[in-house]
Amino acid sequence: MTHTEHKNGDIWLDIDGEPIQVHGGGMLLHQGVYYWYGENKDSENAVGAEGALLDRVDVIGVSCYSSTDLLNWKNEGVVLPAVSDNPEHDLHPSKVAERPKVIFNAKTGKFVLWLHIDTGDYKYARTGVAVSDSPTGIFTYQRSFQPLGADSRDMTVYQDDDGVAYLLHSSDWNATLHIARLSDDYLNVTGVSVLAFEKGYREAPAIFKRNGRYYLISSGCTGWNPNPAQVAVAESVLGEWHVQGDPCEGEGAETTFHTQSTFVIPGKDGKFVLMTDRWRPKDLRQSGYAWLPIDWDGDRLILRWRDTWSGL
Ligand code: DGJ
């Protein structure tokens, strides 16, 4: 089945007519193909999970879909699967594995996947790393850790034009965003790091670069419930970050149109698209997607609701 558009806010279908399962996702463009990675939540919500703070589904793994037009998505399968036979493993179904992001390291030829690893009570608070020779996996899980000893929950990774990559993660129980430069092989953080938005309580970071400046869209911290977005601007990934405010305009602006940011796709002709999730806490597998092209008023970023996504 071929798609010419998807309805924003709904769960979208792949080319086989099946619901796309890549929540909290990110995008990699590699050799002309877009690879969309995210959380596969294709299960009933888990009931009575011990110690679980919030609604959750058992971990299935990270799924990947591929496309050349950002509309018609082929299911490439679960590229980092849960590990069911070891309750201690970071990827055991009882754990939390969220917001996977993949970057390609041209020096090592490896695809490197970073994600948020946690226990159901969100106290483990680590970042995990996995590696593959192919964008469609299977990724080999390496380890999880707390970057520079700091707790790590929502996160993203960003690869700059010069090949330098960074980890941005919510830390200090989400009060502060930590930004750390990655090692050349992208498998670890270096000691080059900064704190941003101290006591700002930002989650769901999505970063991109336009005309030499960096923009960071994030959400507040209200669990699965939507809240206002915030944009910040900097001359360097390591800051200093200046808050520009809430970019949303129009009906629903105060809840980011009932969505939460996850990634910005740098598209053709300098166009950018914010990928968001519309979470359904009581039935997480049905959580929807809404992709919003970014508008500009000079250097000021503006987000407006669009009923459909129909490509770039
Ligand atoms: C908000 C985060 O942005 C999500 O990734 C997820 O961790 C939920 N909280 C859980 O409530």
Image (tube, helix red, strand yellow):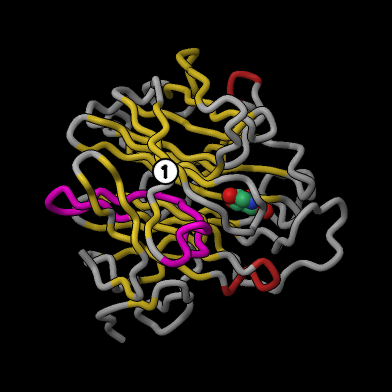
Residue 43 higher or lower than 298, as above or below: below
Secondary element under disc 1, as helix, strand or loop, is strand
Residue 136 place in picture, x, y as percent: 39, 56
- Say whether residue 263 is magenta: yes
- Say whether residue 170 is magenta: no
In this orientation, does residue 193 appear? yes
Q: Report the front residue among 277 and 119.
A: 277
- Quadrant position of residue 85: bottom right
Residue 278 place in picture, x, y as percent: 52, 65
Residue at 56% x, 39% y is 202
In this orientation, does residue 111 appear? no
Magenta extent:
251-273
Residue at 35% x, 49% y is 264
Looking at the image, residue 73 sits to the left or right of residue 191; the answer is left
Residue 6 place in picture, x, y as percent: 35, 77
Question: According to the image, label 1 marks what residue?
Answer: 217
